[in-house]
Image: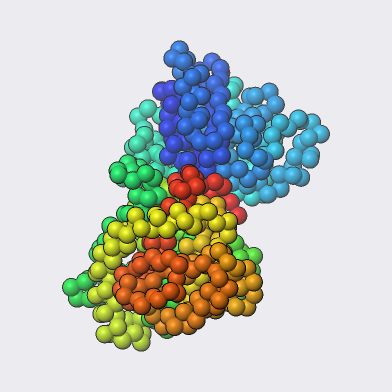
């Protein structure tokens, strides 16, 4: 949520900064801005509402070739305080435009601070960030390091900031608390970035800053301080290759990523599932099985929350372990009753989601066992958790999560089987499940081949303003995730309900032409769900069903999306994949920006 990029070196910073922002754009794309300083303190500032490409166009038209701005900071914004305007766009400046600041995070006490500062300073924006730069101006006493140390003492909340001073043109200071900040070094200079990926093409080494650490960059070198004292920190060689794959034959990254799912599953299982011996073997899972685990609590947000809910059924049915699933924000709002026999599992694509990350910190403080399942290698949650597995979904460019959710569910399934094998899970049941998993990629490919038909159906449903998405048991969270994907990609109101709950009130909304999307694959609850569908039909609602291929359908559904004939557990993966295509095609029909849906960010680093 908001991306920071900064550079000091021998090159012109502006093009480097704009390029860095392109990689960080997944963190927010409401607006973007850049400021550079040359050796004599002259500045170049440019800001634009909308995507980084808008900023790039403005920069191209105004930068010229004659001046080299060797130091600069840049920002891509996901609006938290203040609307999406150029005035609210970072970098923010002090009143005499001496200091410039970019910030990722939220300053929770900004109102009180602003009230005080307003006695002396005029504020031009509605942002919390402007408070930081005005505080720097207020407390500056010839030493920016000391000033920043002092200023951060006033701040409550989360921040990673980078600051430059026109009167010390070759210097950048960065400091962080809770929001991520990485320093990258190359022969040509030093960078600061919100993530390591944005550094992968420009830096040969990198260092992740820890909370309360400050970096001072000067003359192409950097030093790290904690509590005012210089510390030694070994850098890591840049071993991350970050390439945004081109979209190939697909019209969006999201579409491509849905089509990547069979390959992603291969990666998830590779080296972890022995299909020949029909066993799950993974050192981390083996080690986990040694722990005395009586209960599991899964903590995650958004799509990861639904993946967690789906996983909870696996742990219960395959390993006999009771599970609670809590969203990160609710976990933080509740009281923790620490339990050393509970395994706390944190699910996150980005590994940076503030609600999930802060929950993890709270659990760690109580010395309970924590387990992370993350996609982004080296992200905060993987570094903080006692044990972790990567979901191996690869880089997900589409801001709405798709292939990673499927990968998370697959990892949870492996975990449940592995824990189950040490408990009461029948050997034969485990073997059958693993045998089936070998074909899961093929089953998904079959769904993907049905894309043209799903597109046709989606076109029909795109005209609706509101829909129910329904499922029972494991398919209730599947409905939740399918509904979330529809909402965030198409901006249509969809609401997920447990199928059995429909008759307890929501049925009031069902009337002729009101669409109900029902997950009803072959399985334990098939017949009960059919009865509930009859109740919808009795009110002349429209029914779209995700159903297993062989089903005798009669006139139960208005439309069907067929999924392969597999076990119930596997149809979670296939029907969810089909629902991703459905949401994507509705959004395309409505001409939405599917890769960058509005008001969403790939890394939500604020609570
Ligand atoms: C949905 C989506 C968000 C994220 C949520 C958690 O498509 O992208 O709801 O799932 O912000 O993000 P992670 O998984 O990075 O913790």
Where residue 242 appears, as percent x and y from the top left, is 34, 43
Q: Extreme top residue here?
A: 66
505 over 409 or under it: above or below: below
Where residue 295 appears, as percent x and y from the top left, is 48, 79
Q: Is residue 298 left or right of residue 452?
A: right
**Quadrant showing the C terminus:** bottom right
Which of the two residues, 434 or 547, is positioned nearer the viewer here?
547
Callout count:
0
Q: Residue at x 36, y 40 (%)?
A: 200
Q: Is residue 12 left or right of residue 267?
A: right
Which of the two residues, 21 or 262, is positioned nearer the viewer here?
262
Where residue 130 appears, as percent x and y from the top left, is 67, 36
| Residue 568 found in image quarter | bottom left
Q: Is residue 331 left or right of residue 559?
A: right
Where residue 296 appears, as percent x and y from the top left, is 48, 75
Q: Residue at x 34, y 55 (%)?
A: 452
Residue 247, visible in the rendered structure: yes
Q: Residue at x 62, y 31 (%)?
A: 86
Q: Residue at x 44, y 83 (%)?
A: 527
Colour setup of the view: rainbow
Residue 159, visible in the rendered structure: no
117 over 525 or under it: above or below: above
551 over 478 or under it: above or below: below
Q: Extreme left residue here?
A: 276
């Amino acid at each position: 949520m908001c991306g920071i990029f900064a550079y000091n070196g021998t090159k012109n910073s502006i093009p480097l900064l704009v390029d860095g922002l392109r990689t960080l754009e997944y963190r927010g794309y409401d607006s973007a801005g850049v400021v550079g300083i040359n050796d004599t303190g002259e500045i170049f500032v440019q800001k634009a509402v909308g995507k980084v490409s808008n900023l790039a166009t403005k920069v191209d038209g105004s930068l010229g070739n004659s001046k080299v701005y060797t130091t600069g900071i840049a920002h891509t914004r996901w609006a938290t305080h203040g609307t999406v305007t150029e005035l609210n766009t970072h970098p923010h400046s002090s009143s005499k435009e001496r200091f410039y600041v970019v910030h990722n995070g939220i300053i929770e006490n900004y109102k009180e601070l602003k009230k005080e500062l307003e006695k002396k300073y005029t504020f031009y924006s509605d942002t919390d960030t402007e408070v930081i730069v005005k505080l720097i101006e207020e407390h500056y006493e010839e030493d920016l390091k000391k000033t920043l140390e002092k200023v951060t003492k006033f701040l409550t909340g989360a921040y990673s900031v980078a600051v430059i001073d026109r009167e010390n043109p070759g210097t950048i200071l960065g400091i962080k608390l809770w929001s991520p900040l990485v320093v990258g070094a190359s022969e040509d200079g030093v960078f600061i970035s919100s993530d390591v990926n944005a550094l992968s093409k420009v830096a040969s080494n990198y260092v992740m800053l820890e909370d309360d650490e400050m970096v001072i960059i000067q003359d192409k070198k950097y030093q790290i301080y904690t509590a005012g004292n210089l510390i030694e920190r070994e850098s890591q060689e840049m071993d991350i290759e970050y390439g945004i794959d081109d979209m190939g034959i697909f019209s969006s990254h999201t579409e491509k990523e849905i089509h990547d799912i069979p390959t992603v599953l291969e990666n998830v299982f590779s080296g972890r599932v022995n299909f020949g011996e029909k066993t799950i073997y993974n050192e981390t899972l083996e080690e986990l099985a040694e722990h005395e685990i009586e209960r599991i609590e899964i903590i995650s947000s958004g799509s990861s929350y639904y993946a967690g809910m789906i996983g909870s059924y696996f742990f219960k049915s395959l390993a006999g372990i009771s599970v609670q699933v809590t969203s990160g924000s609710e976990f933080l709002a509740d009281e923790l009753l620490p339990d050393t026999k509970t395994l706390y599992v944190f699910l996150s694509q980005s590994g940076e989601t503030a609600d999930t990350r802060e929950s993890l910190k709270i659990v760690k403080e109580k010395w309970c066992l924590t387990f992370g399942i993350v996609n982004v290698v080296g992200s905060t949650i993987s570094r903080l958790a006692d044990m972790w597995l990567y979901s191996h979904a690869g880089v997900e460019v589409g801001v709405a999560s798709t292939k990673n959710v499927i990968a998370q569910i697959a990892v949870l399934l492996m975990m449940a089987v592995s824990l189950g094998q040490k408990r009461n899970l029948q050997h034969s049941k485990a073997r059958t499940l693993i045998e089936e998993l070998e074909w899961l990629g093929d089953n998904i490919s079959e769904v993907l081949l049905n894309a043209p038909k799903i597109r046709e159906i989606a076109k029909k449903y795109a005209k609706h303003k509101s829909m129910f998405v329904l499922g029972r048991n494991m398919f209730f969270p599947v409905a939740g995730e399918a509904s979330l994907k529809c909402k965030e990609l198409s901006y249509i109101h969809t609401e997920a309900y447990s199928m059995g709950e429909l008759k307890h009130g929501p049925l009031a909304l069902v009337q002729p032409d009101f669409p109900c999307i029902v997950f009803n694959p072959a399985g334990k609850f098939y017949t009960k769900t059919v009865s509930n569908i009859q109740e919808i039909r009795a009110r002349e609602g429209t029914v779209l069903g995700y159903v297993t291929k062989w089903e005798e359908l009669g006139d139960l559904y208005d439309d069907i999306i067929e999924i392969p004939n597999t076990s119930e557990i596997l149809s979670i993966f296939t029907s969810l994949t089909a629902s991703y295509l459905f949401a994507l095609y509705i959004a395309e029909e409505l001409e939405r920006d599917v890769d960058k849906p509005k008001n969403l960010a790939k890394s939500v680093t604020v609570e």
